[in-house]
Image (cartoon, grey):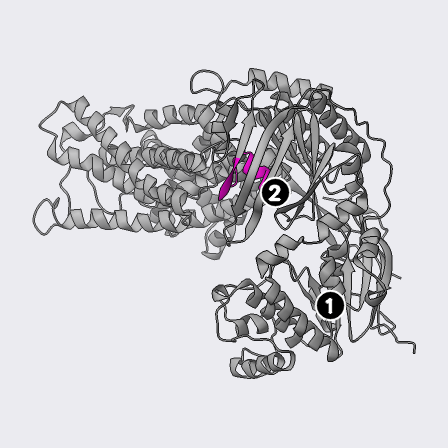
Amino acid sequence: MSEEVRTPLIRLEKRSGMDKKKVWAIRVASILVALILGCIPMIISGNNPFSAYGVIIQGSLSRPVYIRQTIKIAIPLLGCALAIAPCFKMRFWNIGAEGQITIGAMCATYFALYWYDKVPHVVLLLIMFLAAVIGGGIWALIPAFFKAKWNTNETLFTLMMNYIAIGIVAWLQGGPWEGRKGSQLIPMFNDAARLPDVFKVHCGWIVVLVLVVLMYIYMNKTKQGYEIAVIGDSVNTARYAGMNVGQIMMRTMFISGAISGLVGFLTVSGANYTLFSGVADGVGFTAITVAWLSQLNSFAMIAISMMLAVLEKGANTLQTRLQVPASISDIITGILLFTMLSCEFFINYRIIFRSRTGKEEKV
Amino acid sequence: MEKKPIIEMRGITKRFGQVAANDDINLELYCGEILALLGENGSGKTTLMNMLSGIYQPDSGEIYENGERIYIRSPHDAFLHGIGMIHQHYKLIEVFTAAQNIILGLDEEKMDLAKTNVRVKEICDRYGFEIDPARKVYDMSVSQKQTIEIVKVLYRGAEILILDEPTAVLTPQETQKLFNVLRNMKEDGKAIIIITHKLNEVMEVSDRVAVLRKGRYVGCVDTKDTDPQALTDMMVGHSVSLNIDRPRYEHPEKRLIVENLTCIDDEGVKKLDSVSFTAYSGEILGVAGISGSGQKELLEAMSGLYPLREGSIRFVNDDGSEKELAGLPPMKIRKAGVGMAFVPEDRLGMGLVGSMGMTGNMMLRSWKDGKGALLHKKDPNALAKKILEELDVVTPDVNFPVRKLSGGNVQKVLVGREISIGPAVLLTAYAVRGLDINTSYTIYNLLTEQKMKGVAVIYVGEDLDVLLELADRILVLCGGQVSGIVDARKTTKDEIGLLMTQFNSKEEKAHE
């Protein structure tokens, strides 16, 4: 009787292993699929997808000045993805980078506004750097402390902290730090508080590239990186091995917040030369996408953050040239995230279709 | 008078990988009776019932309802056939009220709560339940949650109720209440199966008893014609000779003195109750007991992972000096120079890091070693290679994620690492669970080897045949208490079986 034992039409089987080349081929293919799917909204909005992609590339990479602008977009993305990586490796869902950037920027701004004539240029920048790092770190430490002590939900906690941070800066903007009365703006930084340019882009790019290497070493070669990896795999195993899980969580979050704070410093001191409540500009969230897409691999983050920066910069050109809304870049980023995450599924599982002959087709 | 069974299961077989959880099982159930399904842990009781309630489907075998062949492919199918199961872990939504939980998933009601409340009340009155339909689940006691689960099933019109170890979480008073309800339902013509391993409850509430052992059907008897002794015999079976080599160690000495160990879990339940014993060097101390009798807590408490309420754990050094370990976290125990090795029950979730290779897992014991902030991978790597070779671990290489290895190889990695620290005490929990015969013997030999080196081995096991041949002494846990410590060379399976299942007099008093 056919009723008796019936294999389902589609079933899944765990793959035991796949060689690395094939894995990366699948990942690259998924990017292509995303770009193809990205044509659909362009066609719907009545544009030729090829010329649209052309404009995106042109608008972001065709001239040195465009490239510099694109890199400027990529710097905070990359820095912030590096900040998030250790938390996510630990399965501590820190979605509060936005707030940590804001607080870091705020701390740096204080010294930029009130100390610029008291100390030499380099010293001022160092103080701003330290203030941003410590400020961002402590801001991130708060939810980690509550998680370690009372097991509060870190996702909600870090998210809420974002709005508090943004609120504080909004208040400073219209209150104590307001420049011209009624302007609702904080004055521009004195030259002494601005980061120098290297190859005509503020030197933040060097900082984040150094961080890429440091983070790679930290995650893969150090004792602390090992502890993070163990906790991410199983908290029970970490306890069994004698690790102080709460303490490690707090330490890791401090580091994460510190790097986000540093990104805030780079943004105010290198790009904006002032502080406003929207200083983080969604970077804290987009960086989550960067971190995931690069599988928490620091070097892959360089490529992914550049790719997203190209999309964003290019989409702005697209808007001015072809009147395609710039949010097309968000749509493509979303599709990209979707295809990249689903390709991990195909890397880990194979789908087996039941066939009529009883033989099984493996996909 | 020939009664016709409402449910008949014939030749049911279910395999998980290579293990036959159920092997050719036959079972009959009649209206108006309470059938107790009895068996040790891992004997396949829950698996069998999950097939009746649509969670699993049998690999082979047939199920008949009122003589008609039925196919149960999902819990929904089971419910259409009037079968409802109350699982051991309740599946309720905490922030919903009792009534909301009861009608959850029923679309025909369209959430008419007033009507629901009336019907719930009707059911409650009929069988003697006490619940407040408007109360939220998170406000309820465990026993009240169970009541909702039962009402939920009755509300769906179930004629056949399956209860998976319903008394495991209840106080004696609540148990009595539950039994009264069950008897009322029986009078009403419902057919009831309760899964249990508590003999006194079987005797008290059931009409018939079906016994499973190691996935096989042993037999079915009328409760009035049997007694606990006979049921124990059926449950544990006759001793099987396994030919495990058990040499004697020449000079056993006290190694670990445990006194009055008491642990209480988050819910306030006593998991360990004044446990006292002494473990000797050169001895395998077997720990027997129904699972959940405190074995896990005992080992975790000894290795510093479970908080103690009371009691002391004293480690005796070779020179006779003692070191108090109670209350020390694992790192402190290690720093005190006590070689405490622990092979936990949850291998990948506690003993190992699944996503890392053998080398990464060796480092769990030694990652802090060496100077500076960087990891030192050389020694762990060498150790991984040594274990790979000595224990014949089958893996592509030492960096291949251990999660992807077979169960036997996973256990070899874990045991190999724990033995490599040269322990003075070796704690193992269900060290051979799920392993094939050959690997099991490898593990037995490794443990005996350790014992002959003078290690105090504590072996928590579930297979009594193995315990009887491997261990030197056997400590039996029952409800978190030590119900006896016996000489493994002299005792019998029956004796241990009775110690495992019957609460001693002290326990009864404590509850009253």
Viewer-nearest residue: B306 or B344: B306
Seen from this angle, which residue lies furthest right? B1
The amino acid at mark 2 is Lys
Magenta region, residue range: B296-312
Residue shown at the point (55%, 41%) measured from the top left: B260
Closer-to-camera residue (A125/B421):
B421
Residue B103, located in which quarter of the rendered image?
A: bottom right
User: What residue is rendered at 33% in x and 39% in y?
Assistant: A141
Q: Is residue B298 magenta?
A: yes
Q: Position of residue B62 (x, y in %)?
A: 86, 62
Q: Please give the name of the residue rendered at 44% of the width and 44% of the height, measured from the top-left corner.
A: A93
The residue beneath circle 2 is B296
Quadrant of the rendering where the C terminus of chain B is positioned = bottom right
Q: Mark 2–mark 1 contact, CB under 8 Å?
A: no
* Spot occupied by residue A149 in the image (x, y as percentages of width and height): 39, 44
Chain identity of mark 1: B
User: Which residue position is annotated with label 1?
Assistant: B205
Does label 2 or label 1 sit earlier along the sequence?
1
Image height of B251 relative to A159, above or below = above
Q: Give coordinates of residue B181: x percent, y percent.
A: 66, 74
Q: Residues within 10 Å of mark 1 (few under 14, many from 20)?
A: some
Q: Would you say B164 lies left or right of A29 here?
A: right
Q: Is residue B249 magenta?
A: no
- Comparing B501 with B490, the one in front is B490
Q: Chain of mark 2?
A: B
Q: Count of labels shown?
A: 2
Residue type marked 1: Val
